[in-house]
């Protein structure tokens, strides 16, 4: 009897052992569905009382596929991904529903995705989704509706993280997260990366790392319902890597925007009192080749003071023509960022350049400005297509400097102004002028320092700002209200040049440029300036200047009673010139206008060397040369005359030939006498008239008209 019982027990034990060997040998994959572990035995068709529809798991792809499935496990997890099982993908087809105490429990990195029309409903009693510390849940290209179903639950969020160290990533997904009223939608997450996704509601809501969830601009977590959608329209304008689209254009808020407001309107891309850390990997503002245009360009509208930092060294990167504007003189500070102009449609025509227009008063603080691809493909000089930065309003551009060139490959232009009015001009460094900037032998155009200090590419600070301009230059340096007291300051020139705008007096005081040669004009008086006096003090030597001195003033007075002036070039006049007690050496003196302008010499000594000049003759172009004590000391037998038929101009001639040699004009003391016959052939004054046509006894201050013995009429201007 005992033997029989023992045998029966052993047989039963053997049966139980053998029947359970397969179960003991099955491999588990770290996933449970409706409380049922996914193993090598059931992975091709996971079933159970809590599961309906199709559920299967691919070992090779680590993909859990749900097809029109409902998983209802009210006392357990709908789906759980266990720790140390990273990389699982949950792929949804059709409409699927998860129900559980937590609908989706993520303890290893996982991704939820699906077909284009797929929807996943995640309904949890306490939270819909849980993500463990230091783990990431990615929801990609799917519609997810997550809901806390039990009243008074959801204290820790519908999407719940752990210790503020969990991570989310939403990409091209439509997600609705619903909690009970007053309870947070997303809580205890370190970050949420949004790719092609935006918060649709509530308004002014974005992920805030300080809150560890999605919060409003009021600084509190979003409660109730949070809707995230994939945009349908993109505008091609990015801020700190985030693109404006149909969902965020009026609701543009991100964690790196410390203060202020950003939005996109019909008037342009608006920044109002923005302070933003741009994340370090993207330009602060990026305008791509698909950006929507208004009137042919993208507009940035500035309001108040805006400061953008940490932007990978690029403040504004534009592939399209750009307009910068704003009311009440706003400011944009990007002191360590450059403005880059890159035309992606660069081609074989000369129309590939970009244009930036500043259309209202603004202050722009940048590191540098760089244009790219201004040459066309064939690199011919005539096919240069230069980028431009144009100012239609008085603004300030402050560039802090860059070793590759503070400002390169574009022209900076403004509409200019009349004499004595404000316009935009370079004030730092002194002597930066358009004439010294362009070098067509190189592909890139760089702004350079004054030739007086080497004409080097500027890599330091540059300031372009409003200043009163006087249409006058000395050695290619523009005279403005900023530098008029010491025009050549900082340029290594001994002596001093100054300008008094009240009296229109340009003073040259003991100036010497040294022995080097410079392709600049000693002085230039521009068109539209009033009568101007050039006052000469001490010994002034401009022989290093190879370009012609030019005066466009109606009358230019040289007052040399206190010094001398030596030029290495000629003097070209477009108006009357008066030499008063002046001692001047130059190569030539000529009038470049066919109008009735006069050269008047009063107790002056003018020596013209007759070396090469643009007209080829030493003294010509003036309707008359005259003075109360003027005498042509050399050449002998010289006559100043008009040749209508042959040359149609006035020339100093000798023996009926235009003279291109040295000329010396001096003066006599006392009564005029013939000097070697020089004065014998000169026409004499027969009558003198004032500007009203009345005959007077002698010339007087201002303009007088003199009828000469040869029938000509001459003007005389006396101060």
Image (cartoon, rainbow, N blue to C red):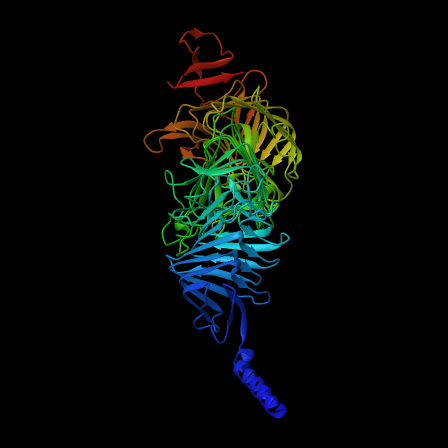
Q: Quick check: can you spot residue 407? A: no
Front residue of this view, candidates 353 and 139? 139
Q: Judge from the rendering whether residue 134 lies leftward or rightward of residue 93; answer left or right.
A: right
From the top left corner, tell me how far across and down residue 493 is, in percent.
65, 37
Q: Judge from the rendering whether residue 225 lies leftward or rightward of residue 560; answer left or right.
A: left
Q: Relative to 209, is 68 above or below?
A: below
From the top left corner, tell me how far across and down residue 550 is, in percent.
50, 32
Quarter of the N terminus within the rendering: bottom right
Q: Residue furthest front?
A: 1
From the top left corner, tell me how far across and down residue 290 is, in percent.
39, 49
Q: Residue furthest left?
A: 645
Front residue of this view, candidates 376 and 256? 256
From the top left corner, tell me how far across and down residue 625 is, in percent.
47, 24
Front residue of this view, candidates 136 and 511? 136
Image point (45%, 7%), residue name: 696
Q: Relative to 584, is 111 above or below?
A: below
Image point (59%, 91%), residue name: 4
Front residue of this view, candidates 105 and 438? 105
Q: Quick check: can you spot residue 453? A: yes
Q: Relative to 620, is 19 above or below?
A: below
Q: How many marks?
A: 0
Quarter of the C terminus within the rendering: top right
């Amino acid at each position: 009897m005992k033997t029989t019982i023992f045998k029966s027990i052993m047989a039963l034990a053997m049966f139980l052992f053998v029947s359970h060997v397969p179960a003991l040998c099955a491999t588990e994959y770290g996933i449970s569905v409706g409380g049922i572990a996914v193993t090598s035995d059931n992975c091709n068709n996971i079933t159970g009382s809590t599961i309906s529809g199709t559920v299967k798991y691919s070992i090779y792809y680590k993909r859990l596929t749900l097809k029109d499935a409902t998983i209802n496990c009210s006392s357990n997890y709908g789906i759980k991904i266990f720790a140390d099982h990273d990389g699982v993908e949950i792929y949804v087809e059709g409409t699927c529903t998860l129900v559980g105490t937590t609908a989706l429990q993520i303890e290893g990195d996982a991704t939820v995705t699906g077909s284009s029309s797929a929807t996943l409903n995640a309904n949890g009693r306490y939270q819909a989704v849980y993500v463990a510390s230091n783990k990431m849940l990615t929801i990609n290209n799917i519609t997810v509706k997550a809901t806390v179903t039990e009243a008074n639950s959801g204290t820790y969020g519908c999407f719940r993280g752990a210790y503020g160290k969990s991570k989310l990533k939403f990409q091209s997904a439509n997600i609705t997260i619903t909690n009970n009223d007053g309870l947070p939608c997303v809580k205890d997450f370190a970050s949420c990366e949004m790719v092609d996704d935006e918060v649709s509601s509530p308004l002014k809501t974005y992920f805030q790392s300080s809150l560890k969830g999605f919060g409003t601009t009021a600084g509190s977590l979003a409660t109730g319902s949070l809707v995230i959608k994939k945009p349908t329209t993109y505008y091609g304008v990015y801020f700190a890597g985030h693109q404006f689209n149909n969902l965020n254009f009026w609701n543009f808020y991100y964690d790196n925007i410390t203060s202020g407001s950003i939005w996109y309107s019909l008037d342009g891309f608006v920044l109002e009192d923005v302070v933003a850390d741009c994340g370090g990997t993207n330009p602060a503002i990026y305008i791509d080749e698909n950006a929507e245009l208004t009137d042919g360009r993208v507009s940035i509208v500035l309001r108040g003071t805006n400061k953008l930092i940490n932007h990978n060294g690029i403040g504004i990167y534009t592939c399209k023509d750009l307009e910068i504007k704003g009311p009440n003189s706003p400011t944009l500070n990007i002191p360590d960022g450059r403005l880059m102009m890159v035309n992606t449609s660069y081609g074989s025509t000369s129309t590939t350049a970009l244009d930036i227009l500043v259309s209202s008063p603004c202050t722009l603080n940048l590191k540098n400005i760089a244009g790219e691809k201004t040459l066309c493909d064939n690199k011919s000089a005539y096919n240069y297509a230069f980028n431009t930065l144009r100012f239609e309003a008085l603004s300030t551009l402050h560039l802090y400097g860059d070793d590759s060139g503070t400002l390169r490959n574009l022209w900076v232009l403004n509409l200019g102004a009349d004499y004595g009015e404000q316009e935009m001009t370079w004030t730092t460094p002194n002597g930066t002028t358009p004439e010294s900037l362009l070098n067509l032998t190189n592909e890139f155009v760089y702004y350079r320092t004054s030739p007086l200090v080497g004409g080097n590419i500027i890599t330091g600070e540059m300031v372009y700002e409003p200043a009163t301009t006087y249409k006058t230059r000395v050695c290619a340096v523009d005279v403005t209200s900023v530098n008029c007291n010491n025009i050549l300051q900082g340029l290594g020139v001994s002596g001093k040049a100054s300008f008094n705008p009240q009296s229109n007096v340009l003073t040259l005081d003991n100036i010497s440029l040294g022995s080097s040669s410079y392709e600049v004009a000693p002085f230039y008086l521009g068109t539209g300036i009033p009568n101007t006096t050039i006052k000469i003090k001490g010994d002034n030597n401009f022989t290093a200047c190879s370009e012609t001195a030019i005066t466009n003033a109606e009358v230019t007075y040289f007052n040399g009673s206190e010094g001398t002036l030596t030029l290495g070039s000629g003097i070209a006049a477009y108006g009357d010139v008066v030499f008063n007690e002046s001692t001047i050496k130059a190569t030539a003196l000529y009038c470049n206008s066919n109008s009735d302008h006069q050269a008047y010499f009063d107790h002056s000594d003018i020596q013209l060397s007759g070396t090469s000049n643009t007209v080829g003759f030493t003294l010509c172009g003036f309707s008359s040369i005259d003075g109360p004590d003027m005498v042509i000391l050399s050449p002998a037998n010289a006559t100043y005359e008009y040749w209508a038929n042959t040359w149609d101009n006035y020339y100093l001639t000798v023996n009926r030939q235009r003279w291109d040699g040295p000329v010396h004009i001096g003066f006599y003391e006392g009564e005029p006498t013939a000097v070697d016959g020089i004065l014998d052939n000169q026409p004499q004054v027969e009558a003198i008239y004032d500007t009203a046509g009345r005959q007077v006894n002698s010339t007087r201050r201002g303009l007088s008209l003199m009828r000469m013995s040869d029938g000509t009429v001459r003007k005389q201007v006396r101060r």
